[in-house]
Image (cartoon, grey):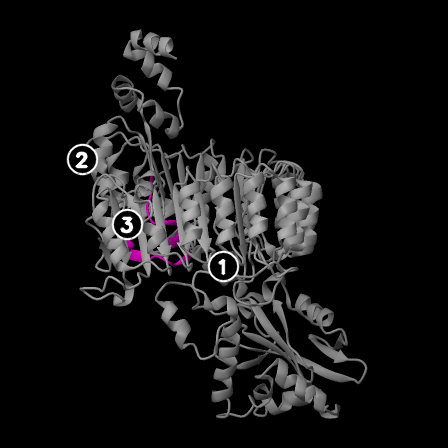
Amino acid sequence: MCLFQCMMNYFPEEVLDHVFDFLSSHRDRNAVSLVCKSWYSVERFSREKVFIGNCYAVNPERVLARFPRIRSLTLKGKPHFADFNLVPHDWGGHVYPWIEAMAKNGINLEELRLKRMVVSDESLELLAKSFPNFKSLVLVSCEGFTTDGLAAIASNCRYLRELDLQENDVDDRKGQWLSCFPESCTSLVSLNFACLKGEVNMAALERLVARCRNLRSLRLNHAVPLDSLQKILVQAPQLTDLGTGSYVHEPDSETYIKLKNAIQKCTSIRSLSGFLDVHVQCLPAIYPICTNLTSLNLSYAPGIYSNELMKLISHCMKIERLWILDTIGDTGLGVVASTCKELQELRVFPSDLYGVGNAAVTEEGLVAISAGCPKLNSILYFCQQMTNAALITVAKNCPNFIRFRLCTLNPTIPDAVTNLPLDEGFGAIVKSCKGLKRLSVSGLLTDQVFLYIGMYAEHLEMLSIAFAGDSDKGMLYVLNGCKKLKKLEIRDSPFGNVALLADIGKYETMRSLWMSSCEVTYGACKSLAEKMPRLNVEIINEGDQIEASPDARQRVEKMYLYRTLVGPRRDAPDYVWTL
Amino acid sequence: MSLNNQLESEYSGSLKTELTLGLPGGAQAPKSAVKRGFSDTVDLNLYTNSEDEVNVATHTQPPPAKGQVVGWPPVRSYMKKKMMTVNCKYVKVAVDGAPYLRKLDLQIYTSYKELLVAFQNMFTCLTICNVIANESKIVDISNGTEYLPAYEDKDGDWMLVGDVPWNMFVESCKRLRLIKSCEKLKLMKSSASLETSSSTSC
C-alpha cells in the first residue's frame, strides 16, 4: 500500500485525472478525495456529476467553488416524510438559487435531477435560457411549477434528450406546452409526462414522436387516448419503455386490431406502466410483449382485477421489477412466485385507501414470494396482517434483502396468530440479511426489535419507525448499534430527550434525523442546537403550538435536524425555527 | 318482510330515505345524508393536504379507523390523489327490496348493454328481457317483477338510464337504483308515461 502510494505520487496529474474518469460513483469519488491534497485537487476538477442528498447541507457557492467543471447536478430537498403530508408545503427546498448561481458562474450545465424540491416556472425559464447544452431534466415528487415552465423548456432547450416528470404536482394551464417543441427538435430519447392532468395536442405529439428517431422511453398521461397510442407505436417500434395513456376502447374495433399489430412490432419494450384508465378486455393486446418485460408497474391500475392480473403476470417470466396493487391478493402473489423467477424487486401498494372494501394481502403472499423468487432483494409490502413465523420464514428464504419495507395497514397490529409483538420476525430479518441497507418496520413493536436492529443491522443506512417502541432504550439501541446509519425517521413513538441527547456527535455522521409526535422537548432541542453548530435543528411549529418564549419542557411536535456546512438557512418560513 | 326491513336499516341507513326521494321538498335532508354516506366511503378531503387535517376532526361522521391517522398508510399523496380520480367511478347500486347494496365500477363497461349484463350477474335473480324494441327491462322471473334502471346525476336528479350517450352517463352518474316499475310511477308522477307498469303488482 505504501509502495503503491509512492508510485501514484510520481504520476503526473493527467494520469490521476484519467484514472479518476473511471470512477462514476460519488461515494468512490468522495473516498478518493480524502486520500491526500493532490488527489483532492485532481478529483475536484474532474468531477462532472455532483450528488447532494440534502440541499441545505451546503450552498450553491461552495459547490461551484469546489467543482467548477460540474455538468450534472442532483439535489434532494424535503425530508422523506413530506411524501405523507407530514411537512408543510412551503417548508423549503427551492431550486432557484442553485440555477441562478450556476447561470451566473457560466456553468455548462447539461443535467439536473431533483427530488422533493420546489421548482417555480421562473426557475424553469432561467434553466431553459441559461444553459445552451442542457440535455436532461428529471423531476421526482416536485411541485411549484406549471405547464408554462415546461413550455419554456420545450421551446429553448435545443438539444434536450430527456424530460422525465415522475409523480409531480403540476398545475396544468391547458396551454400547448408540448407543441412548443420546435420542428427542429429531434433529440429526445426520453419523455415522461404521465403525471400531467391535462391534454396535449395529439397531432403535435405524434409528429414529435415521428421525428425523434432515438426515442426510447415514452410515458403518456391518461388524456392520451388509445387510438393515439396506436399511431405513436407505429412511429416508434424502437421503444424500450412505454407508459400507456387511457387504455380504453371497444375491443372489437379496427383501432384495437391496429393496436395489437403495432404492439407486436415493439419487440424492444422491456418496461411497461400506465393503465390508469383501463378496459380489461383490451389487455390481451399486450400479452406478446409481456414475455420480454423486465419491469412492470401496475400500481396505478386499480381497474385490473385479480383474475386479469394473474393472466397478465403468467406471461411475464422475465420480470425483475414488479409494482402492483394489493388487489392481486395472496393467490395472485402465488402466481407471481411460480412465474417470475427473475424477480428482484416487488412493491405491493394498498388499493383500499378510502374504505371501499377491496382485497388486501397477508403474510401468506409474502411467504410465497420469498419461497419462489430466489433473486428477491428489495420489497415494499403493504399488508392487512403479518406474523413472526412468516417473517422468520422469509428471512430464511431470502438472506439477500437490501431493502425491506413492511407496512401493516393498521400501524400497531400484533402477530395475527399469537397476538405477540412482531419483534422476533423483524429480528430474524436483520439477523439474516447481512447486506440490509434500508428498513421500515410496522405493527406492534417493543424496544426489543430495536435491540435486534442495533445488534445485527451493520450496514443499515435508512430506518423508518412509526408507532413503535416503549422507551428511550429503543432509539438508543439503534443510535449505538447502527454504525452506517445515514437517515433516521421516527413518528409517533415514545422516544425522548435521553435518547436524543445521548450521543450528539452521532448526528454529524448522519444526513438527517426526523422526529414527530415523539417525546422530545423544546429545551432538549435547544440544548442540542447550542452544542452542535454544524447541525441545523429545525422545529416545525404549525398552528403556533409553541409560543414566542416557550417553556423548555414543552413537547416539540416536529423536529428535523441535519448536518450542514453553511449554518441556518435563510429561506425558512415563519413557522420553521432553526434553533 | 320485517327481517328485510331490519337488514335494510343495518346495511344502509339511507335506503329508507331513498324511497322518499320522489317527494319534492322532503328530498333535501335525506339527500344530504345520502351524500355524506357516499363521501364517507370515498372521502375526497382526507389526506389531500395538511390543512385538511383540521377538517377530519369536524367531519360529522367518524372516518374509518385507518383514516384517523394522518399520513397512514404511508402512501405518497400523489398516488392517493391519482387513485382517487379512478375510484370515483365506483357507484352504489340499490335494488328495491334487496337488503344490501352493491358497488360497481362504471369504468369497466363500455355500453349500456354491458351494464345490464352486469346487473344480471350481480343480482342473479334478475334477467334481461327485451320486451319492447329499444327498451330492455330487467325482470325477476320468479315473480314477474319488472325493474327499471335509474341513476342519480350530478345535479341530484333521478334519471332513467339510457337516454344520453354512454360516456356522458358515466361522467354524471353518482349512484344507480333498480326501481320496481310501480315505484317508477311515484317518481315520475309528472310524466304521463304508463307504458308498462300498470299491470304489475308490487
Q: Is residue A454 visible?
A: yes
| Depicted B153 relative to depicted A283: above or below | below
Q: Are marks 3 and 1 on the same chain?
A: no
Q: Residue visible at 43% across and 64% down?
A: B70
Q: Quadrant of the N terminus of chain A?
A: top left
* Mark in front: 2 vs 1: 1
Q: Which mark is residue A120?
A: 3
Q: Is residue A83 visible?
A: no
- What residue is pinned by disc 1? B73
Per the image, label 2 sits on a secondary structure element best described as helix
Q: Residue visible at 52% across and 81% down?
A: B34
| Label 1 packing within 10 angstroms: few (<14), some (14-19), many (20+) | some
| Depicted B29 relative to depicted A126: above or below | below
* Amino acid tagged 2: Lys
**Magenta region includes residue A88:** yes
Using the numbered discs, state the Cα–Cα distance from disc 2 to disc 3 in whole angstroms.
Answer: 18 Å
Q: Nearer the viewer, residue A206 or A426?
A: A426
State how many labels appear.
3
Residues drawn in magenta: A75-92
- What residue is pinned by disc 2? A104
